[in-house]
Structure formats: C-alpha cells, structure tokens
Image (cartoon, rainbow, N blue to C red):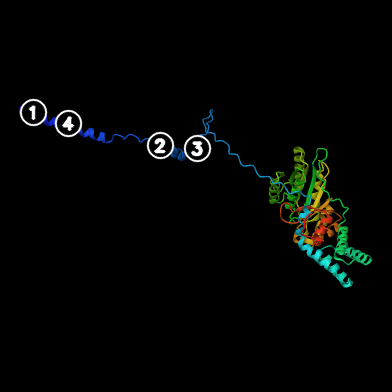
Amino acid sequence: MTDYLLIALALLGLLILGGIGLVVPRLRRRPQPPLPRTEVDTRAEEDLAGPPVQAPEADLSTGVLVEPPVEAPAPTVEVPEPTAGRLVRLRSRLSRSQNVFGKGLLGLLSRDRLDEDVWEEIEDSLITADVGVDATREIVDRLRERTRVLGTRSVAELRSLLAAELVNALDPGLDRSLHTAPKEGVPAVLLVVGVNGAGKTTTCGKIARVLIADGRSVLLGAADTFRAAAADQLQTWAGRVGAETVRGPEGADPASVAFDAVKRGIETGVDTVLVDTAGRLQNKIGLMDELGKVKRVVEKHGPIDETLLVLDATTGQNGLEQARVFTEVVNVTGVVLTKLDGTAKGGIVIAVQRKLGIPVKLVGLGEGPDDLAPFDPAQFVDALLGTESSGQTA
C-alpha cells in the first residue's frame, strides 16, 4: 500500500512541475503595454509617409488600370525683334566696310591737293570694295566735277558729297517693299531662290521672322526636297515663331510640295506663304525646268507676289554671275544680300543692283535670328561712311 502511495505522489509531482514549465514561458512573452504616443511621433510618421498617393482609377468595363495622361510643356514661341530701325541698330556690323568707305575714301578726299594720283586711289578703293568698274567711274567723275565747281574742302562737306553720290548709285527710287498682303482670300506667295551654300534655307527662316515681326502670319513650304536637312532646318526655324511647315518626303516633286503649301495656306487663312526652293546649279536647263514647273503649279492658286534671290556678299563679283542665271529663269523681284558683316566689300550692293537691275530689299548683318534688316539706301550709306558721332544710334 505504501508503494502505491509513493508512486501516486511522484506522478503528482511530475504533473505539477510540467504545468509550471508551460505557464512561465507564457508569462515571459506577455506583450508590454504601448507607450503613450506624442504629437512629435505623429508628425514624423506623416513626413516619412509623404503626401497621399491617389491610385489610378480602373476602367469599370475591363478592370485595367488607366494612368492619367502626362501633359508635355508647351513650346516657347519667340517674338521677333521689330524691323523698324533695325538697320540703324546693326550699323556697327559694317565696321569692316567702314574702314574702306569712311576712313579710306574720306581720308583721300580731304587731302590738301586732289590731283590725278589721288583720284586714281579713290577709284581703286571703290573697285576694291566691289562697287564695280562702270559704277566707280561714274561716281568718281561726278565727285570730281562737284568738288571742282563747289570748291568743297571741309571733311563734313566732302562726306556729304560722297554720301549723295553713293545713295544715287543705289537708285533710291526703286521699290524695296515686300508685297506680303493676301488678296481675295489667297495668301501672298513668296518664292526664295538661290545657290546652295549661300545660307538660303537659314535666310528663308529669317525672312519668315521679318514677316512675323511686321505683323504677318506665315506658313513655310519646304520645296527643297533634295536635302532632307533643309526641310528639318526650315521646320526648326518655323517652330521657333509658331509657324507651320508643309514638307514632303525626301526626293518628292518640289512643285507638288509648293502647291500643297499654298493650298494649306488658303485653308488656314495665313497672310503669306514662303516657299524655299532647291538651289542646284548643275546646268541651267535643269534649273529652268524645275523652277519653271514650281512657278506654273503654284500659279494655279494665283500669281506669285515676290521671288527673292539670296546672294552671299562674300562671293563678290563671282556670285553675280551665278545670280544672273536665276534672273533668266524666273522673274526675280528682289535681292536678299547676306553676310555683309563679314566683308569689307560693302560696295557689292551697288554692283548687284547695277548688273541685275533688281533692288536689294533685305540685308543680312550677322548670324543672329533677327540680324536680317530691310534695306534703306540712305541709312546704309550713312553706316558705311560713319560719322564723327557714329557711336550714336537713332
């Protein structure tokens, strides 16, 4: 009996010890009560979380998440500098030519004695400045006569006489206005022609800026389809002033692109359509055929208002021979003379008008987008000669 009692007590002890082993670990793992939250803790969590993010809405019909469209920033449209007085503001760009005309000629004319040697030097200076032989002889003959009759000796008087002769040689009575106004619902059409390499496409973009600066709305036609870069370049210029460009695939028919440009101009109601043409001069017959076709096709919409010939002033007399080909192919109404700031031969303006019989209407005096200015003979000669107050601007 005693053995059974001992066994029972032993089993009871084991049960008690086992129960204690189960209860104690649970007591140790009991979670501690949370610490009281403070306002600082709450703000820190909000800062880390960031602003609330709105999940994209789901299309109810498909259950597909629809992301909201990302709006691209609108391109900045430039406002071209007004053309009024632009030539006066750019007069300092003619500093190289001023050395020939302002300092060179006036220095010769103001010598104590104007003998044959001095007049020959004056002739040489004008010819070197690309005025041309015939025009130079006329200018010098008139100067000799007037200085002899008037007995002029002061620098101011001599400058006035020289300025009058140079302005007269530029034929100030020529019409230099750009005909860019629409007629009867049809925009004015301007063809831009010239030799490749003269900066024709860049100048075409600058002409567009001139028109927009003078209040015209413009559309550009990239009809130089033989150079893809020309169309890209023209489109870049147009985009900067918010104008539209009509272009075709590389190698497309230039006449077709020009026709579509004018058609689009009529549809959108712009004032002026500016068409950039190819300037290849492999042979005169090919150029004549191509430009002739462009002219015929475009004139199905109406007459062409202006045909502007782009000339590089730095090519001098050689450029005039190339220019003559264009005047024989199309009815050129005006010349755009570029890069005048890069040459001491400012007299090329006189030679261009005399040889081609066409007025210079625009001149380029720098590489900036607004460095193309309407041409005014008196302002141009004044800038060439310089004055004692040449630092002043009008």
Query: Is residue 255 among the parts visible in the rendering?
Result: no
- Judged from the image, the secondary structure of the residue bearing numbered disc 1 is helix
- Residue 5 marker: 1
To which quarter of the image does residue 315 belong? bottom right
Q: Is residue 156 above or below residue 44?
A: below
Query: Could you say where residue 63 lies in the image, as x and y percent from the top left?
Result: 51, 30
* Amino acid type, mark 1: Leu
Q: Nearer the viewer, mark 2 or mark 3?
A: 2
- Judged from the image, the secondary structure of the residue bearing numbered disc 2 is loop
Distance Cα–Cα, label 4 vs label 3: 58 Å
Q: Nearer the viewer, mark 4 or mark 2?
A: 2
Which is more N-terminal, label 2 or label 4?
A: 4
Quadrant where the C terminus lies? bottom right
Query: Could you say where residue 229 lies in the image, as x and y percent from the top left?
Result: 68, 51
Q: Which residue is mark 4?
A: 16
* Amino acid type, mark 4: Ile
Query: Could you say where residue 45 lies in the image, as x and y percent from the top left?
Result: 44, 38
Q: Which residue is mark 3?
A: 51
237 vs 61, nearest the viewer = 237
